[in-house]
Image (tube, rainbow, N blue to C red):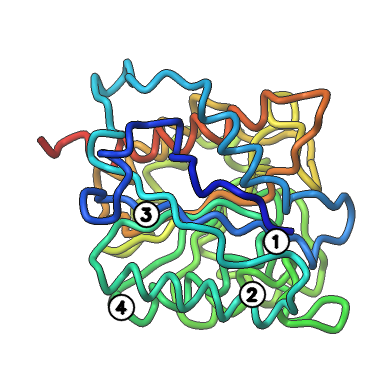
């Protein structure tokens, strides 16, 4: 699937803040869900995300900022949901490298979680001392699933073999994944619930440079029901923001993605949560830059 947004800017911001030359941030939409195994439809996530963004206030109260003025370049469509999974991953890898070469802060919106494989490869080649902060209900650590190493259920396996992988909010996994987890780096949701120091502990385990991958299902389905594999008992909005703000303050976040938004025509609050989360993270990234 392709969707036409050539005339769009993120959140409808003025075009003077949306050119590649004037933008510190690049937003890469990846409308792909070929590997989704239960509810399909996350290929519609980027469109729903961009549509919802046009209804968001651009002043952030908490940081007293209008981060869009730092510039957000929306990358034109470069992938569709009918291409083979390996080709999609290669395309994401190459476009990520392209904008890393331009020294941009790179963000992605999916699509299913398989889109992260390509971007993490590119970040791993550029940045030494890189760790991955993976916020998800699921570990996504299967070496293969349904005959493919590129399934969304495998999205963190390759990264885990190359980088420290700090996993937050986990509450569902297959027993075969147990031997692939980095035991000292995983924060199960039932443990987070009882541990007031989990944020401090998690940040301590991150290296200097951090890529953040956020699956919408890390949130409790009470606030984010529109996702492909919802799990009860997830993170709340403000505890997530509190944690992420600390990460941006203490570490060098070099990029992030938000994946697995599966729009529901009868429920648009998750679309807006994804947009608000995206804008909050940019606000945290630039809050100390004039």
> Earlier along the polypeptide chain: callout 1 or callout 3?
3
Using the image, determine if residue 64 lies above or below residue 209.
above
Q: In this view, does 1 lie to the left or right of 68?
A: right
Pick the quarter of the image with the C terminus.
Answer: top left
Q: How far across and down, in percent of the image, does residue 81 sit?
A: 74, 65
Badge 1 vs badge 2, beta-carbon distance below 8 Å: yes
- Given residues 265 and 183, the one toward you in this image is 265
Q: Pointer 4: what residue?
A: 126
Q: In this view, does 72 lie to the left or right of 225?
A: left
Pick the quarter of the image with the N terminus.
Answer: bottom right
Q: How crowded is mark 2: few (under 14 residues within 10 Å), some or many (20 or more)?
A: many
> Earlier along the polypeptide chain: callout 2 or callout 4?
2
Q: Which element is circle 3 on?
A: strand
Q: Which element is circle 1 on?
A: loop
Question: Residue 236: which quarter of the image?
Answer: top right
> Earlier along the polypeptide chain: callout 3 or callout 2?
3
Q: Pointer 2: what residue?
A: 88
Q: Pointer 3: what residue?
A: 26
Q: Pointer 1: what residue?
A: 32
Query: Mark 1 and mark 4: span between their CA atoms?
Result: 25 Å
Residue drawn 29% across and 55% down? 20
């Amino acid at each position: 699937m392709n969707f036409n947004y050539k005339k769009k800017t993120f959140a409808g911001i003025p075009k003077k803040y949306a050119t590649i030359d004037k933008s510190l941030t690049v937003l890469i939409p990846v409308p792909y869900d070929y590997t989704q195994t239960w509810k399909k439809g996350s290929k519609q996530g980027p469109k729903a995300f961009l549509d919802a963004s046009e209804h968001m206030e651009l002043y952030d109260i908490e940081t007293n900022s209008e981060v869009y003025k730092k510039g957000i370049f929306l990358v034109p469509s470069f992938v569709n949901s009918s291409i083979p999974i390996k080709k999609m991953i290669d395309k994401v890898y190459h476009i990520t490298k392209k904008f890393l070469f331009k020294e941009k802060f790179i963000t992605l919106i999916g699509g299913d979680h398989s889109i992260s494989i390509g971007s993490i490869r590119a970040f791993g080649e550029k940045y030494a001392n890189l760790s991955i902060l993976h916020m998800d209900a699921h570990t996504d650590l299967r070496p293969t699933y349904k005959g493919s190493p590129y399934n969304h259920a495998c999205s963190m396996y390759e990264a885990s073999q190359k980088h420290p992988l700090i996993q937050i909010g986990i509450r569902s996994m297959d027993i075969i994944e147990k031997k692939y987890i980095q035991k000292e780096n995983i924060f199960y949701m039932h443990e987070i619930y009882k541990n007031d120091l989990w944020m401090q502990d998690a940040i301590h385990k991150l290296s200097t440079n951090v890529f953040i991958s956020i699956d919408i299902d890390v949130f409790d389905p009470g606030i984010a029901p529109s996702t492909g594999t919802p799990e009860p008992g997830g993170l709340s909005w403000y505890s997530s923001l509190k944690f992420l703000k600390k990460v941006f303050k203490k570490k060098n976040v070099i990029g992030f993605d938000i994946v697995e938004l599966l729009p529901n025509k009868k429920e648009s609050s998750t679309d807006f949560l994804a947009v608000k989360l995206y804008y909050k993270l940019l606000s945290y990234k630039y809050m100390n830059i004039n």
